[in-house]
Structure formats: C-alpha cells, structure tokens
Image (cartoon, grey):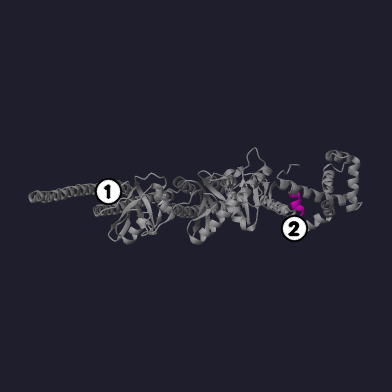
Amino acid sequence: MDRVEDGPTDDFEDHYPAARVRELIERQRRRERELSSLYATARSVTVLRGLDEVLASVVENAHDLIGTDIAYLAVLEEDGTHLRVRATVGTLSPGFDERVHAPAHVGIAGRVATTRAPYSETDYLASTEIVHDPVVDGAIEAEGIVSMLGVPLVAGDRFLGTLIAANRQERPFVREDVALLSAFGDHAAVALENARLYDESRRALQALEKAYATIEAAESVHEALTRVVLAGGDVGAVADLVADTLGGGVLVLDHAERVLVARGRPADEDEARVRERAVLAAAPRMAAAVVGGIEESRRSGRCVTVDRGDTLRHTVAAVMVGATHMGALVLSRHGDPDPVEARTLERAAQTAALLTLTQDAVVRAEERVRGELLTQLLTAARPFPSELALRARTRHIEPSRLDTVLVADTADDRLSDTTRLLHAVADEYDGLAGEYLGLPVALIRTPATEDAEQAARSVHQRLGRGLGAPVLVCAEPVPPAPEPLGAGVTLASRCCRLLRGIGVFDGGAGTERLAMYAILFDPDRSQDLESFLDQAMGRIVAHDTERGTDLLGTLTAYFAHSRNVAATARALHIHTNTLLKRIERIGGLLGQDWQRPDHALRLQLAVHLRDLARQVEQGDVAQG
C-alpha cells in the first residue's frame, strides 16, 4: 500500500524534472526563434533608406513579430506638441490615422512619450491611468481595440515616437512581449534616426545641387550680358536675354516711362496696350503699380516686385547711372521671381545702364557733329562750298536735294527730347536735325508723294507719340538760291509762335497759309494779337457761347463765299431769309457798319485766323 501510495509519488518526482526541463527548453527555443526573428527584422529595417519606407516596415514587422491584430506608429511632430500616426497595419475603420492625431500627452502613445517607458492596458477605454480624448477614444472604439502595448522609440536623447501593438480582445501583455517589442523598438529607433538623417542629407544634397545649378545659370546669364556689352549690343539684346531666361513680358522704359523695347509675350491686356501706344501711361492701372515700383527701386537700388492682383506680378529694376535715372526694366509674368531671378534682372538693369550710357555718349557725339553740320548748311550761301557738300555726303546726305525746313515748338523742358526724336525722323527723310537758335530744326527731303504741309503733319504725329505731349511743327519749303536755308527757319518759327498766339498748341502745318499773318502780326507780342481778335469778334464768340448759336460759323461761310448771300445760304443748307436774319443779328452785335471795307477786312482777318486755328488743331489744313 505504501509502495502503491508511494508509487505515484515517486513517479511524479521522477517525471517532474523532465517536464520542467522540456518547458524550459521549449521556452528557450521560442526565445531563440523570437530573437532570430527580431534580428532578421531589425536587419531588414536598417537596410532601408527612405523615412516613409522605414516607417511602413517598422509597423509591418512589429505586427508580425508580436502577432497582434493591429500595429501603428505615432511620430512626434517637429514642434513637439502632437503625435501623428504615420504608418498602420491591420486597421479597418476609415480615417483612423487622422482621428488618432492628438496632443503629445493623450492616450498610451502620450503616456509613453511622457515617461519614455513601455506601457500596456488590457482594456484601454476602461483605463483611468491614461489621459483620454473623445476623438481618439472614438477612433479606438470604432476600430474595436481593447488591449494595447506601447513602447518608446528613442535615439540618444531624442524621443521619436511610440510604437503600438493592439488587439481587439483582452490580452495581457507578458514581460516577454514587452521585452521583445522594446528590443525591436530600439532597433527601429536607430533605423528611423538613420532614415531621418539620410533624408536630411538627401535634401541638403538636392538643395546644394539646385544651388549649384542656380549659380551656373546665373553665371551663364552674367557671361551672356558681358558678351552683349563686348559685342556692342543694345538694350534690345538685354531684353531678349531677360525674356528668354526668365520668361514673361519684358519692357525697357526710358526716364519718361516711354517704351523703348518690348520683348516676350504681353502678360495681360494692359501691357499689350502699353506696347501698342509705346508709353506706360496708356494703361493707368499698370502705370500706377509700375511707377511706384520704379521709385522704390531707385531708392533701394534693388529690384521691386509689385502685385497686380491674382498671380500677376511686375518686377521692376530701375536703370541708374550714379544718381541719374535713365529708365527701367519691367518683367511682367505670373508668380514671384526667386532671389536668383531677381538678381538676374538687377544685373540686366546694370548692363542696360552701361549700354545706355555708352550709346548716349555715341549719340550725343553724332548729334553734336550733325548739329554743327546743320548750322553750317543753314547759314552757308548757295551753292554750297564743295568742302561742306562733301561733309554732308559722307553722312549720306545730298544737300542739293534738301527741300524743306521743319521747326518744332514744344515746352522748354522737352527741348532735348524733341531734338533727339527729330534726329530719328530726319534720318527717315534723308536729312538731318539739330538745335538751331534754341529750336529743334530739321532739313529734310520730302518724298514725291508729300509736300511741306503733309510732311509737317506726319512729323507732328511722330513727335507727339514719342513725347506724349503737345508739340507744334511748321514746315517751310527752302528759299530759292542763293538765299541761305536759315531764312526758312525764321518764317517757320514765326508761324509756330503765331499758332500759339491764336490758341493752338498741338498740330502740324505748312507756312503757306500762315506766312501772311506771321508777317502782319508780331508773334512775340501775343497780347496784341489776342486784343485784335477780341476786338474784332469777341462779342460774336460771347453770344455763341451764351446762346448756343453759331454766328461765327455763319460769318466764316459768308466771307468764304465773298459775301454772296445765295451761295452762303446754299453752303449752310438754310433759307436765304434765315441767313439774312443771322446777318442782321451780327450787325446788332458789331454795329451796322461792320460790312464797310475797313471794318470787314479786320473782321475777315480775325475770322480767317480763327478758322486756321481750328483746322490746324484738327490736322486737316487745306491748300488754298
């Protein structure tokens, strides 16, 4: 019996050590398998380079290693205030990643971030040991998560994030689970840190490559601008280079905001209008923005970008020579220029300043030579001395064929600009221009299709567009030999002053119709002319203004038809009785003796001058 009783006891004691040993061996083998899996997983993670690739691999391997339903990784954001889920495995509910984005102290991820130690819960939603958040709890509940284990990912002193393994049922995590996931987390932290450093290095390398490419591009532009200068190019070549390099529309403006050169495609309708009219003021909205940019660029010495709404930008670089404002480069396109593009525009403006200065010196020297030649041609007796004629021919001017003298009259502060523009116009007429006796003067050869009057109108239009201001142009056929050509300047300039005296400040006309009045009246005594006009027909003008009538028009037609009542009525398309009533009303204003020869002559002169003024202003002076 004892032996029987003892039998089982002896048998248990005999077998217990063997069972214990088998359990330990099995545990050891499982541990070896886990460690082998851990090291294999760690090796697979550490060979990866891209941060996103490493994050996804860490979560996937953790999921396989621990054998949980779900695994995800919450990474600490740069500002250290929030944890953001960057990778998940096993989740089913949509938007889980965004909903679990929470402050860095919330949930198991937040507790691990705070303590930097592993932490687990068998029932997350019921736990009172962690900080809950309604949004995060909603996401956990929607996913059906119950138990969770989180371990920190730390590289040196830097906390990277929390690696979490979770199940959809209660499952206590034993020490081996914690140790295994923590060990993997250590490897994963190193891999994440390496991936972060790799990404930073790659971005730094890309930035360096981009900076190098930018430097090369800037150097290329600088070399191209240098070649333009060395090749004797002009601002048009600079504008071409800017348009090709930076894109958009490019305008080169002079100091008065007139368009010298336009390149590339216009950025909008305003720029197209500015190009068409060759002056910035043609588009007031654009002008307001660009002029402000020019002023700021002049003060700062750097280019300035001004906003025109939406994405359209005007980048302006003032063209300066010392403190002298020569003009501006305007780049119009959608989007702001980067710093290198801005520097490119500034270099282009500096090059344009150098070219402008050089060309201006050449032009001034040429203008001075031509001005001296013009003075000699105007004052020399004819036929011209052979030496003078030879000098003219070396500049492709045949002095014997010059047939018209032009005089331009504008505001005193525009004398230089007017003379410069007149040079260009005179070249087209195989002539020359310059300043003579303080006036812009040109000697030209009119084509067979033009007379002096038509040439005056054509030149007036060209000068008006270039100046953007009123200008008078009078043309006089050259006097017959041997009288010097300068005599034509005297008469043409008197006609210009005469036009100003009768209130005309903008127009072009020949001297043929004006010469008689320029001789009768001293243009330099404009107050006498004004007094004459007022005394002769001031009452009629006042009556027309007050009553809305046109007695002055009737009087003009009356004199034009040699005071013939029937012919005048037909020309005015009115009945003879109507005309007679108007004539009677004129007599009531001027006195009944207004048709006496001496009174009628004064009145006819005044009316004719007034009609000439109207016709010149309208640009349609007729030969008669």
C-beta proximity under 8 Å, tags 1 and 2: no
Position of residue 538 measured from the top left corner of the image (x, y, whole percent): 83, 55
Image side of residue 393 versus residue 231, left or right: right
Q: Nearer the viewer, residue 62 or 519?
A: 62
Position of residue 4 measured from the top left corner of the image (x, y, whole percent): 9, 48
Image side of residue 605 versus residue 467, left or right: right
Residue 141 inside the magenta-drawn segment: no
Amino acid type indicated by mark 2? Ser
Q: Earlier in the sequence, mark 1 or mark 2?
A: 1
Numbered badge on residue 526? 2
Helix, strand or loop at mark 1: helix
What is the magenta range?
515-521
Position of residue 544 measured from the top left corner of the image (x, y, whole percent): 83, 51
Image side of residue 497 versus residue 589, left or right: left
Q: Nearer the viewer, residue 16 or 452?
A: 16
Residue at x 89% of width, y 47% of height: 583
> How far apart in space, not on screen, are marks 1 and 2 (Cα)?
108 Å
